[in-house]
Amino acid sequence: MASPQRRGSRRYPDRSPMGLQPGERSDGPACTPVQRVLLALTIPLESLQMVKARMMLAMNKGLNRQTHAQATVKMLPTYICSTPNGTENGNVLVVELRQSHVRTLLMTLMGDGNYSPELSDHTFDMPEDLMQGTGEALFDFIAQCVRQFLGDECHSKNHLPLGFVFPFSCRQTRLDKAELISWSKGFSCSDVEGKDVVQLLQSAINKQELSQVEVVALMNDTVGTMMTCSTRETPCEVALIVDKGTNSCFMADVQYVQTVEETSGRMCVNTEWGCFGDDGALDDILTPYDQHVDEESSNPGVKRFEKLVGSLYLGDVVRHALIALAAEKALFIGSNVTVLGTKGVLTTQQVLEIISSEEGMTKARTTLEALGLRPSERDCCRVQQVCRAVLSRAAALCAAGLAAILSLIRQSRGLERLMINVAVDGELYQPQGRFKEILHTVTGLLAPECLINFKLSEDGTGRGAAMVTAVALRLTDQRREVNQLLAPLRLTRADLERVQALMRQEMDLGLGQETNASASVRMLPTYVRGTPDGTEQGEFLALDLGGTNFRVLVVRVAEKSIQIASQIYVIPTNIMQGTGEALFDHIVDCIMDFQMRQDLKGQVLPLGFTFSFPCKQLGLDKAVLLNWTKGFSASDCVGKDVVQLLQEAAQRKQYLALKVVAVVNDTVGTMMSCGYDDPKCEIGLIVGTGTNACYMEEMQNVGTVEGEQGRMCINMEWGAFGDNGCLDHLFTEFDQMVDEKTINPGKQRFEKLISGMYLGEIVRHILLALVEKSILFQDKTCPTLQNRDIFKTKFLSTIEIDGLALTKVQAILWDLGLQANFEECSLVREVCQTVSLRAAQLCAAGLAAVVEKMRENRGLGQLAVTVGVDGTLYKMHPCFSQHLQQTLQDLAPNCVVTFLPSEDGSGKGAALVAAVAVRGAES
């Protein structure tokens, strides 16, 4: 059997009892009373792992909105959302309510990293009767202490923020609002429970005519401990108190704290883990000695974990173990042990002195003799063993709780390994003490994936509380600046209604024959006169030209199904930028190759041509190219009919099977593709790299085309909405900077507020403004942020994924060379959310104008219509579609709009345009 020293060191805990003498055994019927006591007080590693698992379950229960009320570990939000970053400055006042006195402290921060704060403090003794008196008397006394402490400063007009350390269980709903749940620690002041203690203190301060003093933060000592040990370079995210009571707190990703409304960033959670086990979760490790201590306490049955760990109780646990041993004649033979029946005769401080390696035996003797006992050398040794066992068990249980927190943090952040700083305070955590040694060792055994740096707190309740208050002020100032910066991008209902009205106005201008030329929304007729009705049948070819890759498709339309076969062909750069003849000859070569591969050689199939370049359409099969984009510059094409150019190339190649019946853009193709699946689909919407919309308009309203009967699909080209200046009031300085660097400044203004090509750039310029204001990336160079297009819109989609841990956001930013901390990651996410929300809302405002016009055209009280939609921003962004649909519902309440994602609008859609055209020609 190992020696007591070895048993209590690195190998603790295991399945053997701790602190036995060499040669002693704990198994079998010959087990001695001392061995049985030590065995009862020893928790094997397997049991500690079970305690850790139960603690994690209890914590998750406390974080969950549905189970919070029944949870023993309450996981109370503190509304502290940041740790110090070193820029805090100014004067901060702290008031700390303690067991028998009130402490006041004034700290001046210089913004120098918090390395040299100026401190002054004073402690005021509190009359005992105040603890059981009225709440008003207690808070009046605290306010009088503040006034006396400030002295001549009482008459200063300078704002003085105050942090209030209130070490009782509270239900906090803001940093400066907390209702007392219940008193403890001997306090029972009337008319306070259920009241906001911040307001009670502020009212008392106001009675003292201290108008400059404002209570801005309330916290407990655990949170203060964490804040004291935290700097920008080494942020501390966990704190542990092991004193008369015990508690812990940690910075949790706020998305997991379901009891608050916030959804982004981090928040300090006060676990209140002293109540762990009140539901019986610790019953299998409780000893008879713990039961006796609980029965003697002022609150039997509650705070079970605290009664196993807190220094207020450890002396009495030892005392009851000694009583049991004395009853079995294993200790103090011949002594009157009646004194051991008195609660509190053996203190935890004496226990700590007894287990001291140097003078422990001597201290054990003097302590026991002071109680009137006559201990033998063997008695002193066994008392020392019991003291060591009780303290070691407390440290091991504390380690199990801490390991639960660390594992919870690691899992919630999606990390394989966690590196973290843990602040510790309390009389049990002595620099060279046994408690510290076991806490460190066992935590490492129970959380091997975590690399922990323990930091001893200095004045957590004073200096730490001042830091909480200073951080709260910094965040308030920062929030004010951020809100001011982002305010122009946050659109009101009135803003969106105005955009909707302007879009409707521009639509009407675009449809008018005489006003079309001056309209920013061109409302181009497509000559598509109907949507699929399900009767279309046959084989159709489709071409899709819109980039460096060119697609040829055969679409076989049956009564209830569509089959598609396709081939992708590359267009070499020399052809893209060569002659028009070479380009269209290449296209015809690809068509001929495709028909041969598909065994269609010689067959004349109707062909739909998706040509995704700006065109002026003069008929369903006639479209004049206005200008090339996307890297194309083939000569002798602009100003010519692209269908005619294709037919001329077919003639040159002696390809007689070409029959182009329709030329369309991708927006119309999207509508037609979805129209085959849903006859109510009469709107097409693209929200991707660019944006556009089309819809079925009444012919009588289309002044640019002859005819009054039926409907025609109108290609709105709404990306240019606002090019005439009607949206200038919405353009922010960031939008202007993005616009100025594009190849078409002043053009496609609406598209530059909405589409994926530009959103990342808008975010980048906002981040640069935040850097300039020293809100983001302080003391860090951000050269990559100066690079245009470095912040892709796809990053917005990833960063805004619901539930994405801030560590993932941090990884994205680090890949961009942006060394962001978690607070900065949260702010970057907010910027992304603001920009993408505005885009979705503006898109919805434009669409609201469309659906309301269709409803009015048809004289309906309510319109039911489907929108065929395509584009990476709509499909890939986690929130865009939801925000778009919700805003549209708000702006057009008389329209029931269904969104149907398109599948291959530019291919399948073009073929269906051809199919509808053939159907119309045959009817």
Image (spheres, rainbow, N blue to C red):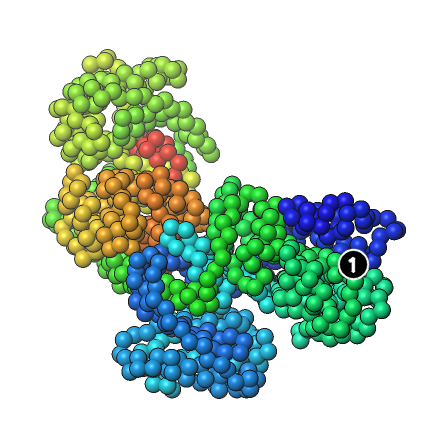
Residue at 37% x, 34% y is 904
Residue at 59% x, 61% y is 428
Residue at 32% x, 36% y is 669
Residue to which mark 1 is pinned: 378
313 with respect to 542 (left or right)? right
In the rendered image, residue 25, in percent from the top left (x then y), is placed at 81, 48
Residue at 81% x, 63% y is 331
In the rendered image, residue 534, in percent from the top left (x then y), is placed at 41, 37
In the rendered image, residue 627, in percent from the top left (x then y), is placed at 15, 33
396 with respect to 333 (left or right)? left
Q: Residue 885 versus residue 261: which sits nearer the camera?
A: 261
> Is residue 422 visible in the rendered structure shown here?
yes
Q: Label 1 is placed on what type of residue?
A: Arg
Q: Is residue 828 above or below residue 555?
A: below
Q: Going by the picture, which residue comes out furthest to the right? A: 29
Q: Is residue 812 above or below residue 501?
A: above
* Residue count near mark 1 (Cα–Cα under 10 Å), binned few <14, some 14–19, many ≥20: few
Q: Is residue 595 above or below residue 606?
A: above
Q: Residue 899 versus residue 725: which sits nearer the camera?
A: 725
Q: Quadrant of residue 11?
A: top right
- Image quadrant containing the C terminus: top left
> Is residue 508 visible in the rendered structure shown here?
no
376 with respect to 310 (left or right)? right
359 with respect to 513 (left or right)? right
Labels in figure, total: 1
Q: What is the secondary structure assignment of the residue under circle 1?
A: helix
- Image quadrant containing the N terminus: top right
Q: Residue 313 versus residue 569: which sits nearer the camera?
A: 313
In the rendered image, residue 554, in percent from the top left (x then y), is placed at 37, 24
Q: Quadrant of residue 325?
A: bottom right
Q: Residue 923 versus residue 577: which sits nearer the camera?
A: 577
